[in-house]
Amino acid sequence: MLIYNVEILNRDFEFVRGSLEIDEEGYISGITDSRRGDLNGKGSLLIPSFTNAHVHLGDTITRDIWIGRSIRELFRPPNGLKHRILKEKSDEEKILAIKTALRELMSSGIGAVCDFREEGRNGVLLFRRAISEFPIDSVVLGRPDGDYSFLEVSDGVGISSPMDVGLDEYSRLVKEAKKRGKMAAVHVGEDPFNQLMALSQYGETEVELALKENVDFLVHLNYATEGDIDLILRRRVPVVFCPRANLSMGLPPPPIDELIDRNLIAIGTDNSMVTSLNIFREMDFIMRHYRLEPKAVLKMVYSGRELLGLEPNYIEEGNRASLLLMRIGENLRYCEDKFSALVGRAGVENVSHLIVGTRVLSLGGDLNKSR
């Protein structure tokens, strides 16, 4: 397949005009100067698809009930409002909600996602059933629901907090996941009560307690101390940030600006109950709130693949194609900085096609329409 007459974001993060060749196996053969091909990219940008590195897609079934409620009322397991609502819903209702979320993800250019799934083994299997119809890469991290059988069908464990499950159980969960060659990730520094409890009971921060185990990445860090930041940097532990969801819950902004040039970090949109899954909104907020260079923010939606252990999708020879064709609509005309345009102005209306391997899906209309 040849996508021609298009501006391509190459591995050096430079835009070059040309054509992109994808072989029969769905891998990038290279950039050429061919003037004819299969898909005309005139008036478009060709970029790698994005990664949403932290979501809770099960929450889609109960959106926008968070107003006026605290983080503990909503999310603390096992009896937070979200957990009670999930118990009331049927499996088919949950699958339908997750499919709705996946369509929303794809519409904003997501080619890979990491979902933290509640409800044990069955919760993971519901996600697997839902995503089987979608051509995007995924990592699903489960949680126990009476036993550890969820680890047989998940990519690892996604823990709500060391303080929520208790330090002994936290240690067992991480060790069991690692013993099976799977990932372990944990929310830390998100709930102020958990931070206070860690300090009062153990004399250490939640981050310090979490990093007593060999976790693959941390999520949030709203209440991280300078000592926590230093420890994360020394240990080289990757972090996923979700600032819009955090601020919606009245939490302080996470320390993205303290880690962006010093550590592997990625971004997610977090709970579908609270925020949209639109990664463009997340990028725009981060760029403006922290006054960061747009290119640095854009790189965060690509580093998620490395953080999650997925194969890279930068546009270079040998990588599997997972790409976006971005239409330069009225909202992007006259922009003199393409990176600022992509991060601060672009939206779902600009995503015209998702290319995965040899499949070309038109996102301007029916998501199931493909070439």
Image (cartoon, rainbow, N blue to C red):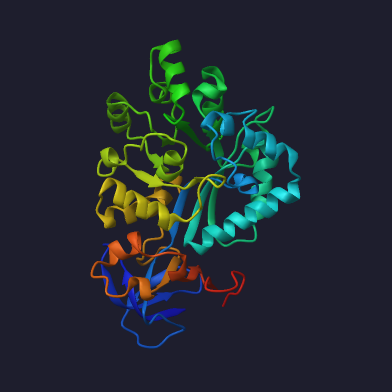
> In the rendered image, is residue 346 in sight?
yes
Q: Quadrant of residue 164?
A: top right
Going 55% across and 59% down the picture, which residue do you hit?
104
**On-image quarter of the C terminus:** bottom right
Going 61% across and 49% down the picture, which residue do you hit?
60
Where residue 73 sits: x, y (%)? 58, 30
> 16 or 153: which is nearer to us?
16
Q: In this view, does 158 lie to the left or right of 95?
A: left
Where residue 148 sits: x, y (%)? 65, 30
Where residue 44 sits: x, y (%)? 37, 76
> In the rendered image, is residue 328 in sight?
no
Please tell me whether residue 228 is drawn above or below residue 256 in the rendered image.
above
Q: In this view, does 306 lie to the left or right of 91?
A: left
Where residue 339 sits: x, y (%)? 29, 63
Q: Quadrant of residue 188?
A: top left
Residue farthest toward the bottom in the current orientation of the protein? 36
Q: In which quarter of the image is residue 329?
A: bottom left
